[in-house]
């Protein structure tokens, strides 16, 4: 939502700097373990696997790994480790390395995985010559070299696809008892912030080599593009959830989110790795195919091979826990990741509509007037949001009774037109005597503790604040219950939630977050006391927001007895966040470059599981002039999460506050969104089934076209639409890359285009979007005030023909707001078009939904031989259909078939 | 709101409709959603041609829930066309034109419920009720305007009177001005004449004075040289004509910081960085620094510190003056006057020296002439300033019939939880926090900014104090009819853009509402 301190806003604006204060955030050399271990690259790894200790049980191979002092001829064992290799379903492996007998248990990230991963079979093929060879049920082999320890993962063709510890950077720093006089080990200081580091050093590291890869992708959230770059000059990519005021573009700095999944792609295959760790993490990348990597080095390392990308994951604590995703297509790898960490559940339909937000709509009259103005100007809108000012002095779960005396009535005004409200609840709790939440949390010990075990106090919006320790199940339960309607008066099932500032943001903390030596709950266990009796914030930092979201999600489900689907938005992101929440790219700026950045940022998040992503339309800071605002609406109308938002100090910018021509363009953009709402809804449904991103990089569907690999200024929605937003001022044309054989039909004109490159002329009203030949896209042309009011409206099916005069598509329909679809109350239809007939068949057996929607129109683009007649058959009845052929662009329109979308139908053609 | 826009857009039909509304219930056959005025365009016996002429379709395609015309004219009664218009008669109340997207969307938009015909039980016809309420409200407004108009007439009278007074005043002032200018010219002549004489007689005194001054300076110089040489000789213990470091180090007076010894810094200071100084250098470099120290030792010289105290006090005083300037501009003039008087005092005091009787007499006469001239000049300026003010006021737009004129300068206050707002008509708007702090200007009188047909319904006050990191504050005052002049609400709908509701009889207009009233009567 906003920035870390209002005072700073002042300071920045006054001196005219509009970018991040880099001094607030650590570079690698200011982060103790990164400085210490980034150069760690021994010639030979000390780690070796004890072949005699190997045990294969079920899908798991376990063995002892030891470090050996290489300089010592007696081969003294330095330290012992427990090694595990697991074969998991769907071409996935897991490699774990922990100390065999650590001084205290090391932290294992708890919430990222969507339950225990499913097992696959694992067979030991051979064990000799210092090598162990295993295979899973899909034919992926793993070759373990015992000394030095190295793991090679082979694709189904027997080629090496992923190698671990090739560069000898495997490391698990053993925990040790406190010793004096070790600079940096037992304490660290950053600016005025002291980190007591009571456990000393406990970093982990692992390198990964991806042979044959052109690029690596993933590890959001950063601002430097979809394909990751070589990091040898400058800092590594950093993953540490931070509230970065006025973040900058093209940077590897950490921002709000951290999803440590990386994909490597080349013509041969796509693979991925998921570094299962919630501590501060730095990732180095070397792409030997990049021009700027010294060529002699390329030859030395790759043995003459042209393509190879190396990556190295380095985390401050935890264990080595690496999932290897064997692909082999991009879609396979993306699915394998969501199989581990979960998919985004089917969102309530309204949340795919347009959201109107601002910090802040100041009172009920303001809300009412914004709501009414959308109708006056006939712009569809599904929700109005309230930022922090609705609360009583920033005490969440309360209302400012002067500005918002009748919240229920206010919400009822919205729901009368099918609209919803979304309100913010941040995790920080105001330390205010008499505030029930603070009093309960203090009395019951629900707050995160500082290094001395006292309630940690930080500074946030309300002033002095503390932070619930969601890691304690009792605290999470308590927090969830705050969302019950009786505990949060004025809310109803139509009031949805926004958890902001959950990195967590602490204005006066180190790097604007919580000190690493704060203490979190750990379930009590016999024999564990002192340092072993709690987790430090350093272990769990990137996971904190996820715990916050899980508690909120539980609360939202419970308050409506599990009947209604909640909507939740978050700023902090971690692996698994997608199971609970949509995400947005935080506090961006009203500049063209930030509009452009919204595409790669959301693409990165999408392939890392977070399909439900968007950026603040118009930009949070500063004021977008009419052209930028227009282009931003046009772009965001084709991004998954579509919300306008702005800073309290900026000029108001609701669509009607611009010149009438701009308002009209915004209306058009929103109408385009609403016409495609069922297409979006179907994509999100399919995501819950197949785990594929909704918003997709081009290479996902065109993995053999190297030209698509670096493209991140255009993208696909499903496999049907290609979107190229206009992100520059004064554009009169844009260059579009159209992959594959095409044709690609301009959705405005149905004019077919062939790739690979075209120059698309654009006016201020043009949004370059193309429908792939061979697809069918469902539309509803009757755009109303809100999505709910369109529930029974008829469909137009747009059929874009391929070279064989055929096309296929799908359509998902349900009530849009409950979980009844889990009781088979839905329609999932497959739609197929061929020269002889067009069919609409229900693809899910036993599933039904009594929708009032019907088929208004079929538009067939690219028709070469028009049929003479068409007949609709449904429920045993036949109807002759009227057709119109538009010769100019080969479009055939079937007029009003009027078939019910609740039941199958067929249209047959005669020539 | 919605309906209102559409009514606005189709106001022409609205008027037609109102005139024939009595027949609304009659059975003029027309498709659903078509207004009477357009009924003739939909003839069941003929094919239908889209209003834009782009297509002709069978009449059975009209309102068949499929959009055939680009302009939406074939589907007045369904939601099929995105740009269509649905007309509801709303018998008993005002008719409405809705976008087609509101037809059968589950929300009752027409008071007669005809927009939701797909679900006949969804909406009840509440037009009678609403119409009754609307008529009652119209009645109330009409009565208010009627009553208010009486008060308005008083205001107009007062306003005209005020303006006439001002006009009279202006004429008088113009007269006064020429009179005063005449006096001023006379006094100037007199003054110049006397000053010339004064100059003449004082010339002798001035020359003598100058001579005295020079003499004093020469004397001082000589004394200084003498003193300096004396001291030099005293410090030059080896009499070599140069002062060396060693020679200086034994002399107490060079120990500036009084730490019991003459250290290098002190030496450097006195010798200007050199090892030694000769007599000339001593005179130019060392002596000027040394002399005050010697005098201080003898208690003849006030140290610098004492002086700084006074400057600080002065600074504070200046500061206060600045504050005063900030608070109110009206005091500016009086400040100026005060300053002038100061100056005058000074000239007088400067000249209160002793001259011989003859001279003194001339000087006194000249002083008196100067005083009289200044007075005359001030009188002219005052009159001019008054003229300017009155002219400004006379140029101000006080409404069609000067109904706002008498309110000029009247101030009205409004309190909310945090602030006290003050509107001084045709002057400025301010805001003051109840927790104290400075008054913040929310705008100075700018202009009338109502719509063309109702210019005097909105006042704009602009150029208030600039918002931190934003534009300067402005206030829009909506002026409504009521029997008493008062502020009824203040809001800040946009940052730094304030909105005030002012009610006043000046805004009551019997004539405008009477029209509206008759149209309601027809309903």
Image (spheres, helix red, strand yellow):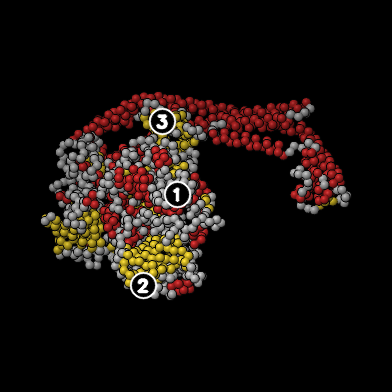
* SS assignment at label 3: strand
Q: Is residue B215 left or right of residue B464?
A: right
Label 3 Cα neighbours within 10 Å, binned few <14 / some 14-19 / many ≥20: many
Q: Secondary structure at mark 2?
A: strand
Q: Which residue position holds label 2? A: A127
Q: Residue furthest right?
A: B239
* Disc 1, SS: strand
Q: Residue at x 22, y 35 (%)?
A: B126
Q: Which residue is mark 1?
A: A519
Residue B328 vs B251, above or below: the answer is above
Do the residues bearing badges 2 and 3 touch, measured as CB atoms within 8 Å?
A: no
Quadrant of image for the C terminus of chain B: top left
Residue under numbered circle 3 = B487
Question: Could you tell me if residue B9 is visible in this image?
Answer: no
Q: Residues within 10 Å of mark 1 (few under 14, many from 20)?
A: many
Badge 1 and badge 2 in a common chain: yes
How far apart in space, not on screen, are marks 2 and 3 (Cα)?
92 Å
Q: Is residue A336 left or right of residue A841?
A: right
Compute the Cα span from label 3 to label 1.
56 Å
Task: Give residue A19's position: percent from left, percent from top.
Answer: 48, 53
């Amino acid at each position: 939502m906003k920035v870390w301190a209002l005072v700073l806003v002042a300071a920045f604006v006054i001196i005219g700097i509009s970018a991040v204060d880099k001094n607030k955030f650590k570079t690698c050399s200011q982060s103790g373990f990164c400085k210490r271990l980034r150069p760690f690259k021994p010639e030979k790894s000390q780690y070796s696997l004890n072949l005699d200790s190997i045990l294969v049980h079920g899908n798991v191979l376990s063995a002892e790994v030891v470090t050996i002092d290489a300089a010592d001829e007696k081969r003294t064992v330095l330290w012992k480790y427990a090694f595990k290799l697991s074969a998991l379903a769907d071409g996935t492996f897991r490699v774990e390395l922990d100390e065999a007998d650590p001084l205290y248990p090391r932290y294992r990230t708890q919430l990222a995985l969507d339950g225990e991963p499913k097992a696959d079979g694992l067979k030991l093929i051979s064990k000799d010559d210092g090598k162990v060879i295993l295979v899973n049920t899909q034919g992926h082999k793993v070759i373990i070299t015992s000394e030095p320890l190295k793991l090679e993962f082979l694709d189904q063709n027997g080629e090496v696809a992923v190698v671990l510890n090739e560069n000898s950077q495997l490391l698990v720093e053993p925990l040790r008892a406190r010793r004096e006089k070790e600079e940096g080990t037992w304490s660290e200081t950053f600016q005025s912030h002291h980190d007591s580091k009571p456990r000393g050093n406990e970093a982990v590291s692992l390198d990964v080599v991806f042979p044959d890869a052109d690029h690596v992708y993933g590890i959001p959230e950063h601002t430097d593009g979809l394909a990751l770059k070589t990091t040898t000059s400058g800092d590594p990519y950093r993953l540490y959830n931070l509230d970065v005021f006025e973040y900058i573009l093209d940077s590897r700095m950490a921002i709000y989110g951290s999803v440590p999944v990386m994909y490597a792609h080349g013509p041969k295959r796509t693979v991925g790795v998921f570094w299962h760790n919630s501590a501060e993490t730095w990732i180095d990348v070397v792409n030997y195919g990049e021009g700027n990597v010294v060529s002699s080095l390329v030859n030395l390392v790759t043995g003459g091979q042209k393509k190879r990308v190396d990556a190295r994951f380095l985390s401050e604590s935890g264990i080595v826990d690496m999932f290897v995703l064997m692909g082999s297509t991009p879609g396979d790898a993306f699915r394998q990741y969501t199989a581990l960490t979960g998919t985004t559940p089917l969102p309530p339909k309204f949340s795919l509509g347009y959201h109107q937000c601002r910090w802040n709509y100041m009172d009920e009259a303001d809300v009412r007037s914004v709501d009414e103005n959308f109708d006056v100007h006939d712009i569809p809108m599904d929700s109005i949001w309230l930022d922090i000012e609705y609360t009583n002095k920033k005490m969440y779960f309360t209302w400012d009774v002067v500005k918002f005396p009748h919240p229920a009535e206010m919400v009822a005004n919205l729901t009368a037109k099918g609209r919803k409200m979304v309100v913010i609840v941040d995790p920080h709790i105001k330390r205010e005597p008499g505030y029930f939440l603070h009093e309960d949390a203090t009395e019951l010990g629900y707050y995160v503790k500082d290094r001395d075990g006292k309630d940690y106090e930080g500074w946030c919006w309300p002033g002095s604040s503390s932070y619930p320790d969601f890691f304690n199940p009792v605290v999470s339960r308590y927090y969830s219950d705050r969302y019950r309607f009786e505990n949060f008066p004025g809310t109803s099932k139509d009031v949805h939630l926004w958890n902001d500032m959950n990195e967590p943001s602490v204005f006066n903390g180190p790097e604007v977050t919580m000190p690493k030596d704060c203490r979190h709950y750990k379930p009590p266990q016999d024999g564990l006391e002192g340092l072993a009796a709690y987790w430090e914030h350093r272990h769990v930092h990137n996971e904190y927001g996820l715990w916050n979201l899980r508690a909120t999600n539980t609360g939202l489900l419970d308050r409506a007895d599990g009947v209604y689907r909640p909507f939740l938005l978050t700023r902090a992101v971690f692996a698994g966040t997608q199971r609970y929440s949509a995400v947005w790219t935080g506090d961006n700026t009203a500049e063209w470059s930030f509009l452009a950045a919204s595409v790669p940022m959301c693409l990165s998040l999408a392939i890392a599981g977070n399909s439900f992503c968007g950026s603040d339309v118009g930009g949070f800071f500063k004021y977008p002039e009419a052209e930028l605002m227009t282009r931003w609406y046009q772009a965001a109308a084709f991004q998954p999460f579509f919300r306008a938002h702005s800073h309290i100090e900026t000029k108001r910018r609701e669509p009607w506050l611009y010149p009438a021509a701009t308002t009209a363009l915004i209306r058009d953009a929103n109408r385009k969104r609403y016409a495609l709402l069922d297409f979006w809804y179907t994509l999100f449904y399919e995501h819950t089934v197949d785990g594929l991103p909704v918003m997709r990089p081009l290479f996902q569907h065109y993995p053999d076209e190297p030209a698509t690999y670096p493209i991140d200024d255009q993208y696909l929605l499903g496999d049907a639409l290609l979107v190229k937003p206009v992100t520059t001022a004064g554009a009169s044309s844009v260059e579009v890359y159209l992959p594959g054989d095409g044709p690609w039909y301009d959705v405005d004109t149905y004019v077919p285009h062939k790739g690979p490159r075209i120059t698309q002329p654009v006016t201020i009203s043009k949004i370059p979007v193309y429908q792939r030949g061979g697809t069918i896209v469902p539309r509803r042309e009757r755009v109303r005030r809100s999505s709910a009011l369109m529930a029974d409206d008829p469909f137009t099916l747009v059929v874009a023909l391929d070279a064989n005069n055929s096309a296929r598509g799908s359509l998902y329909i349900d009530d849009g707001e409950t979980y009844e679809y889990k009781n088979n109350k839905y329609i999932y239809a497959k739609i197929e078009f061929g020269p002889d007939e067009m069919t609409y068949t229900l693809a899910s057996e036993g599933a039904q939904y009594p929708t009032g929607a019907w088929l208004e129109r079929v538009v067939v683009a690219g028709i070469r031989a028009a049929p003479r007649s068409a007949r609709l058959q449904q429920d045993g009845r036949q109807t002759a259909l009227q057709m119109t052929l538009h010769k100019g662009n080969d479009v055939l329109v079937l007029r009003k078939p009027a078939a019910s979308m609740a039941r199958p139908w067929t249209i047959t053609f005669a020539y | 709101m919605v309906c209102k826009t559409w009514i606005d857009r189709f106001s022409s039909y609205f008027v037609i409709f109102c005139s024939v509304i009595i027949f609304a219930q009659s059975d003029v056959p027309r498709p659903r959603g078509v207004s009477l005025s357009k009924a003739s365009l939909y003839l069941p016996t003929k094919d239908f041609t889209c209003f834009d002429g782009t297509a002709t379709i069978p009449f059975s395609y009209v309102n068949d829930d499929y959009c055939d015309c680009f302009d939406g004219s074939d589907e007045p009664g369904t939601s099929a066309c995105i740009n269509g218009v649905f007309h509801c008669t709303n018998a008993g109340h005002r008719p409405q034109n809705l976008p087609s997207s509101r037809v059968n969307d589950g929300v009752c938009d027409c008071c007669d419920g005809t927009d939701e015909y797909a679900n006949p039980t969804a909406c009840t016809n509440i037009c009678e009720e609403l119409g009754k309420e609307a008529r009652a409200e119209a009645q109330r407004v009409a009565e208010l305007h009627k009553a208010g108009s009486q008060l308005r007439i008083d205001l107009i009278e007062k306003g005209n009177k005020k303006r006439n007074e001002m006009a009279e005043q202006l004429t008088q002032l113009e007269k006064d001005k020429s009179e005063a200018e005449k006096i001023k010219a006379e006094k100037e002549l007199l003054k110049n004449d006397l000053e010339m004489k004064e100059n003449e007689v004082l010339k002798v005194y001035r020359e003598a004075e100058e001579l005295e001054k020079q003499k004093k300076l020469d004397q001082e110089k000589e004394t200084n040289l003498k003193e300096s040489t004396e001291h030099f000789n005293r410090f030059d213990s080896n009499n070599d004509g140069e002062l060396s470091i060693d020679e200086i180090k034994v002399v107490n007076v060079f120990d500036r910081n009084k730490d019991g010894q003459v250290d290098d810094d002190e030496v450097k200071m006195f010798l200007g960085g050199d090892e030694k100084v000769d007599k000339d250098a001593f005179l130019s470099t060392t002596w000027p620094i040394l002399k005050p120290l010697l005098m201080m030792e003898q208690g003849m010289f006030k140290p610098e510190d004492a002086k700084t105290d006074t400057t600080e006090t002065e600074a504070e005083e200046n500061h206060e003056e600045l504050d005063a300037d900030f608070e109110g501009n009206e005091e500016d003039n009086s400040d100026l006057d005060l300053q002038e008087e100061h100056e005058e005092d000074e000239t007088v005091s400067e000249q209160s020296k002793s001259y011989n009787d003859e001279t003194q007499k001339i000087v006194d006469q000249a002083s008196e002439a100067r005083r009289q001239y200044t007075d005359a000049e001030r009188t002219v300026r005052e009159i001019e300033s008054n003229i300017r003010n009155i002219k400004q006021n006379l140029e101000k737009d006080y409404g069609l019939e000067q109904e706002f004129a008498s309110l000029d300068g009247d101030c009205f206050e409004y309190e909310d939880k945090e602030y006290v707002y003050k509107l001084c008509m045709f002057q400025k708007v301010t805001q003051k926090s109840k927790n104290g702090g400075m008054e913040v200007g929310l705008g100075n009188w700018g202009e009338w900014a109502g719509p063309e047909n109702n210019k005097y319904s909105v006042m704009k006050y602009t150029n208030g104090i600039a918002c931190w990191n934003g534009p300067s504050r402005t206030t829009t005052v909506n002026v409504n009819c009521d029997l008493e002049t008062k502020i009824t609400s203040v809001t800040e709908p946009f940052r730094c853009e304030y909105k005030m509701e002012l009610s006043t009889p000046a805004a009551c207009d019997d004539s405008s509402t009477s029209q509206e009233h008759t149209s309601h009567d027809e309903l």
